[in-house]
Image: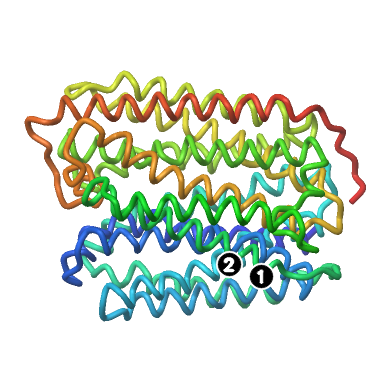
Amino acid sequence: MESESRLIIALMIAVLMGAVDSTIVILALPTITVQLGATLSSSIWIIMIYLLVIAVGTTQLGRLGDILSRKRIFNAGIGLFTLGSALCGAAPTILSLIIFRGVQASGAAMIQSNSGAIVADNFPPNRRGRVFGYTSVGYNAGAMLGIVFGGLITTFIGWRYIFYINVPIGIFALLFAIQNIRAGKRVKTSLDIPGIVMLALSLSFISYAAVDITSSGVDAFNELLIIIGLIVIVTFVMVERIVANPLLPLKIFRIRILSFSIMASFFQSLGFLAVVFIIIMYLQGIRGLSPLYSSLLLLPGYVVGSILGPYFGKLTDRIGSRIPATLGIAIMAAAIVVYLTLTIVSSLYVVLVGSFLTGTGSSMFYPANNSAVMANSPRELYGLSSGFLRTMANIGMLGSFVIAISIASISVPRYVAFEVFAGVLNSLGSVSASFMSGIHASLIVAIVILSIAAMLSLSRGGEVRSGKH
């Protein structure tokens, strides 16, 4: 039991490290933009490149863990993330910072894509929910620390230390993981190089077009990029049907609970991750709050998620994933309904209530859904299933950014919404009412997307958890 506890701690530290960086960078973006003399359209790639690399890399890096050993890839990910963090802190230009963020994201993808498979290797199906509950504590605690310390470090020490702070944590996490994570079994398979190249190209074209649209509006250039990206996606799907080991794992889609759980994760990310961006835009742009104060209002959700995650994980082990995961999505949708009551002059306590519901729903959905994937995946597909789950969730996260900035800015000039998101504009003045309408529209779209996620989650079917691997 002691070795299992140390394994859980190792996973929690690695997850926490990545979560800290996800929230801390958003708070520092305005300062980085000014101090590096960057344009808004270039500085936003500090966030976009991170999401893009993780979205593309997770499936194949999970498969690489199947081939070379999950312990090796997981530990290498911690080391690469730590190195990338040090390079980001020392970056002299915006271009170098974007490149080093890609290095950092590569390490994060290695960690994400193998963590679920490591849990499946070391714990039977009837105990995985509890373990995923503890890893969700690592995520929520990391995001919470990022919010608390991000503004303080940026304001009083300097933005470079939001990256440097990862270095001592990463060194400790690597040494601890080397000692406490077992290698697991290897699987004979191969990488899908054509698939990953085409997925990278298609998402890159579409992401670049999205950033260009939000900063300068729709034109022939970004329309062409979107068309090319869609053509590459169609080609990608066709190629995946004939390659030996496709990036799109057809075996997974033959297992109902597994495939429905992964698709539920995709639509949950697509709908719900946008909400954080939208509420921060509301707090900064319409209410004129600082990035730090805005994020602190969302803090209760992370606290609640950290406390409740293990309890709902244990519940999943007893009754299966369908009810907790679906109810979690429903509570997230209820949080969005609460946010829909926001007006230009409404009480900020509304945000606190919504944040509380967000944390409750998240603490139910993530442990249940993640354990459903790994509990119903054949052993030979552990790495592939874990990686594909993260890939679909991260593609959804990437899409949520586009949804948030695009729909919310329909009623105001796009450069205004873009500046609000980047944190360099703290008041919308006379266009606040129009922007409020755009925010409400984006929240309604989020509810529609979450409804799809809930239907998929409910339709996944029942399951019986046993103590066997």
Amino acid tagged 2? Val
Residue drawn 41% across the image and 39% down it: 274
Relative vertical location of residue 216 with respect to residue 314 in this rendering, above or below: below
* Residue 421 on image: x %, y %: 26, 47
Relative vertical location of residue 35 with respect to residue 12 in this rendering, above or below: below
Residue 49, image quadrant: bottom left
> 48 or 9, which lies in front?
48
Residue drawn 86% across the image and 37% down it: 465
> 354 or 386, which lies in front?
386
Label 2, label 1: how far apart the Cα atoms are: 6 Å
The N terminus appears in which quarter of the rendering?
bottom right
From the viewer's perspective, tell me whether residue 326 is left or right of residue 107. right
Residue 391, image quadrant: bottom right
* Residue 85 on image: x %, y %: 42, 74
Outermost residue on the right side: it is 468
Amino acid tagged 1? Ile
Instruction: State if disc 1 and disc 2 touch (CB < 8 Å).
Output: yes
Task: Give the residue number, with chain letter if any, for mark 1.
Answer: 193
Q: Secondary structure at mark 2?
A: helix
* Residue 23 on image: x %, y %: 39, 54
Relative vertical location of residue 156 with respect to residue 408 in this rendering, above or below: below
Residue drawn 29% across the image and 30% down it: 439
Outermost residue on the left side: it is 430
From the viewer's perspective, tell me whether residue 290 is left or right of residue 334. left
Q: Secondary structure at mark 1?
A: helix
Which numbered marker is on residue 385? none
From the viewer's perspective, tell me whether residue 277 is left or right of residue 55. left
Residue drawn 69% across the image and 25% down it: 458
* Residue 354 on image: x %, y %: 40, 27
Relative vertical location of residue 143 with respect to residue 64 in this rendering, above or below: above
Mark 2 closeness class: few <14, some 14–19, many ≥20 residues within 10 Å: few
Task: Give the residue number, with chain letter if any, for mark 2.
Answer: 197
